[in-house]
Amino acid sequence: MIRNFLRGISSVKYMTIASSTLEVIYDYSRCERLPLFRNLSFLRVEFYGYSWEMLPIFLESCPNLKSLVVGSTTYQEKEGINILSEPRCFLSSLEYVKIERPLKGEANEMKLVSYLLENSNNIKKLTLCLDGSIKKEESVILKELLTIPRLSISCQVVVL
């Protein structure tokens, strides 16, 4: 059933997906290879808490993805999850990323940003929003962002 569903939607160009659906796809990928989403050029992922470790698995199946928007509606941390423990793929077509969730500079957030910068060789722009109520000083977060290695030498990091 999941296989048929994934094959049925594998030709879409634009997709918005919730983390609960991404979790089902992630679980499925542990048993069977995901179909390629060759036409997918824009992906919006809505996370509920920290479920980012599932994102690279799905991105592997999106060889022509140009734009990624990461949104979130809650700000709760899941315990015991090793988010993005190993980069699994190079994101060769990804050009634009926007992380709408206000960043607080926490380790899990910085790991996602690092993953995207270190594995996207054509990324042109990464847009981040900082949380106004952050405990970590803004200058510390900005310094941390500047130290992250980038695969793309032309990547512009915009902090709002």
Image (spheres, helix red, strand yellow):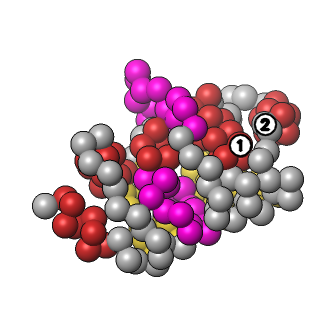
Q: Which residue is disc 1 drawn over?
A: 118
Task: Give coordinates of residue 70: x percent, y percent.
Answer: 54, 56
Q: Secondary structure at mark 2?
A: loop
Please identify the quarter of the rendering in which residue 12 is found. Answer: bottom left
Residue drawn 56% across the image and 67% down it? 65
Q: Position of residue 134 (x, y in %)?
A: 68, 35
* Residue closer to the observer: 45 or 84: 84
SS under mark 1 = helix
Task: State how many labels appear.
Answer: 2
Query: At which x and y percent is residue 62?
Result: 49, 62
Q: Nearer the viewer, residue 49 or 57?
A: 57
The answer to whether 157 is drawn above or below residue 83 in the figure is below
What span is colored magenta in the figure?
Answer: 58-87
Residue type at mark 2?
Answer: Ile
Neighbours of disc 1 within 10 Å: few (<14), some (14-19), many (20+)? some
| Tag shown at residue 57 | none
Q: Are marks 1 and 2 in contact (CB under 8 Å)?
A: yes
Residue at position x 71%, y 43% in the image:
118
Quarter of the image where the N terminus is located:
bottom left
Q: Is residue 3 left or right of residue 10?
A: left
In the rendered view, tell whether residue 37 sits above or below residue 141: below
* Residue 60 forms part of the magenta stretch: yes
- Please state if 36 lies on the left or on the right of 27 as rendered: right
C-alpha span from label 1 to label 2: 8 Å
Q: Quadrant of the C terminus?
A: bottom right
Residue on which the image places disc 2: 148
Residue 85, compared with residue 160, is above or below; it is above
User: Magenta region, mostly helix, strand or loop?
Assistant: loop
Tell me if residue 50 can be seen.
yes
Please, which residue is most extreme toward the front here? 33
Name the residue located 68 percent from the left edge and 39 percent from the top edge: 114
Q: Amino acid at mark 1?
A: Glu
